[in-house]
Image: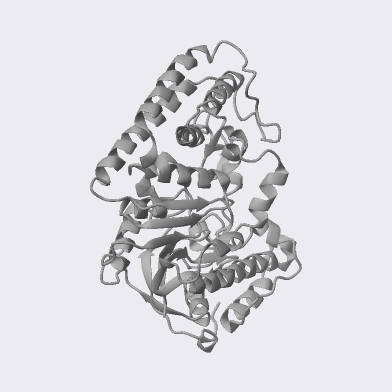
Amino acid sequence: MIFEQSCFPFDLPVKPNGNGAAFKDPAFMENRTAPVHRWVPWIAGFSGAFVDSVLAAYLARRKSATVLDPFAGVGTALVQSAIRGYDVVGFEINPYAALAAEAKLNALRVETRTFDEAMAAMRLDARLWHSGPVTTAVAPGGFRSHIPFYGPKVEEQVLHALAFTSKIGDDRVRDLFRVAFGSVMVSFSNYTYEPSLSTRPGAGKPLIEDADVAATLLAKLRTMRDDIEWLRRETNGIRPGSGRVYNEDFFAGEGRLESGSVNLMVTSPPYLNNYHYVRNTRPQLYWLGLISSPDGQRPLEEKNFGTFWQIAREKDHVALAFEHCGLEQMLAGLRKLNGEKGQYGGNGWANYAASYFNDCDRFLVVVERVLARGGTGVIVVGNSILQGVNVPVQDIIGDIAKMRGLSVEGIYRLRGKRVGSSITASSLRGGGSKATLDESAVVVRKR
């Protein structure tokens, strides 16, 4: 689909990777082996190495600064910035991700002796985990799954583990144990990430009838204990930055930030790819007691940045809240596609895209307010392919940023190809479109 060039108000060609100091690969996969970042598997976000390259590019001459991540996820940007001595503030709507980010930030303040004592106590307590039902913990009543999430022998151990964790007196140590459980809990369940959460039989894998829950948990906790020691060595001679993670959506919480208080924002908003972040963490949210019913899950979905396609598709028409004739033309063309499919056709996807860009506009209004004069925002986003239509998300965000008074240093290509979950009629799914997915950093500045 081709659009009139005049409909795009600003000429922002994508530049090759580099801004005087090249950005590192943002792929979160690197975090799987990186100390602290490896504590929680996460499909979204970017690598610690990428954050370091951003800090080097924009804060190298500053000894103190405030770094913001409005979509903090499990805290990669916050932790890496705090390690380098910068104060941080993050917002994260998902309670499980917020718990993980906060626990990581607090790790340096954990008494290792207390941590070691809790692990030793768990080893002793685990001797009884096969001996019968536990009365101080119960499976979450509001949690529903297509097949039993745990086999009976595994669930018995899980309930013992949760009961033990709830009795840990030190809040920071208890949170680390909860994060450890959330990190490994799917591995001994009848579900698997492929990358979305699905049943093991559906992925061609056998059910898990029994597993050593304590051994899995303790192995994770030992890794975390090693990483806390690494943190202390890494920050030797450096005052780690202080920080806070707010478990709320950025639009509800942005009033906590004073105007002009942020020196650097580095973030990656949810992509326009229909990945259902909330549903893929349902097990952690329910089993850790972070929500107890669909009534607790629903606000996380409705207030998610850009909402979800499953919500937007049911609306008659979502209009843009700002003027951008190129995007309006794109949405109009998208609405005409596959009308016979009803809400699964182009109109539903156009509503989804309009909702997403409306939130991008709201987001950039707040960014312009909270950035200090001369402050920088690095926004990692990817393009999307909806119903075979290539949506240049990075270009549109650059346009909106300029509309809202920010200057755009550039758009830097970070990765030339990635995998997406909502690609329809694209080259990645054998369809007619020749478009491919890429990932870019949109760098904005406050004048």
Q: Position of residue 286 (x, y in %)?
A: 62, 37
Kindly give the residue lying farthest to the top in the view shown: 131
Is residue 397 positioned above or below 166 on the image? below
Q: Is residue 47 visible?
A: yes
Quarter of the image that includes the N terminus:
bottom right
Q: Position of residue 178 (x, y in %)?
A: 50, 34
Number of callouts in the render?
0
Left or right: 107 in relation to 353: left
Is residue 86 positioned above or below 127 on the image? below
Q: Is residue 424 visible?
A: no
Left or right: 243 in relation to 64: right
The one nearer the camera, 271 or 70, is 70
Kindly give the residue lying farthest to the right in the view shown: 316
Q: Position of residue 287 (x, y in %)?
A: 60, 33
User: What kind of colouring is applied to the model shown?
Assistant: one colour
The one nearer the camera, 209 or 28, is 28
Kindly give the residue lying farthest to the bottom in the view shown: 6
Quarter of the image that includes the C terminus:
bottom left
Q: Measuring 31% from the left and 33% from the top, which residue is drawn there?
A: 226
Q: Position of residue 445 (x, y in %)?
A: 41, 75
